[in-house]
């Protein structure tokens, strides 16, 4: 449940996903696993939003949490028109792979595992999704091959 202010950053999930909009409209920006080399996926420290004394939200790194991990994430908004300034290879190649899909009330989107996606909404939107485990097959092998070929699973240690 959310409104125009609810926007996810670009990410991928290791699950098959069925997504149904009950009310409103979701806008998915989809990128196939083949776009991975252009997305500059990096590991970022995990954080938690906490409310400050004046009622604002701030992100606080989970440094003191022994279970805290780093998370793979895309460091830019794939829908930002100014992305070419910092990520010219995405602007030139990766952006051409992007597909915008509008999912309206009573419509279902099947989102394959390992597809990158950014999600926004128009107005007040209510949606439900169902994840289920992906089958390890050619799609996973293709994705891993790209990651290996481009050295994408060798992340530098974060500085604390």
Image (cartoon, helix red, strand yellow):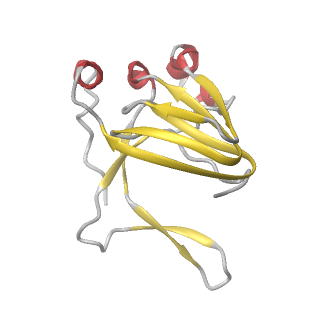
Which of 12/51 is in front?
Answer: 12
Please state the total of marks drawn on the protein image. 0
- Whole-percent x and y of residue 65? 29, 72
Q: Is residue 153 left or right of residue 58?
A: left
- Between residue 7 and residue 42, name the one nearer to us: 7
Task: Mark yes or no: residue 75 visible.
Answer: no
Q: Position of residue 142 (x, y in %)?
A: 27, 18
Residue 102 coordinates in the image, percent (x, y):
67, 32
| Quadrant in the rendering for residue 146 | top left
The residue positioned 43% from the left and 21% from the top of the image is 35
Residue 154 visible to an observer of this rendering: yes
Quadrant of the rendering where the N terminus is positioned: bottom right
Residue 3 position (above or below residue 98): below
Residue occupying the point 74% across, 50% down: 4
Find residue 28 and report its image quarter.
top right
Which quadrant is home to the C terminus? bottom left
- Residue at the farthest front position: 106
Q: Residue at x 71, y 54 (%)?
A: 5
Image: 96 above or below 1: above
Q: Residue furthest right?
A: 123
The image quarter containing residue 152 is top left
Q: Nearer the viewer, residue 83 or 137?
A: 137
Q: Residue at x 53, y 17 (%)?
A: 97
Question: Left or right of 157: which side holds 125?
Answer: right
């Amino acid at each position: 449940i959310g409104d125009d202010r609810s926007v996810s950053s670009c990410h991928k999930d290791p699950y098959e996903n069925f997504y149904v909009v009950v009310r409103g409209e979701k806008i998915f920006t989809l990128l196939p696993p083949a776009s991975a080399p252009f997305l500059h996926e990096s590991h970022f420290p995990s954080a938690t939003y906490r409310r400050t004394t004046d009622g604002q939200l701030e992100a606080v790194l989970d440094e003191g949490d022994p279970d805290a991990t780093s998370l793979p994430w895309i460091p830019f908004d794939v829908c930002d028109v100014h992305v070419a300034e910092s990520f010219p290879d995405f602007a030139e190649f990766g952006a051409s792979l992007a597909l915008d899909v509008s999912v309206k009330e009573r419509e279902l989107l099947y989102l394959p595992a390992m597809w990158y996606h950014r999600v926004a909404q128009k107005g007040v939107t209510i949606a439900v999704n169902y994840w289920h485990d992906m089958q390890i097959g050619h799609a996973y092998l293709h994705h891993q091959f790209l990651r290996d070929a481009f050295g994408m699973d060798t992340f530098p240690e974060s500085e604390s």
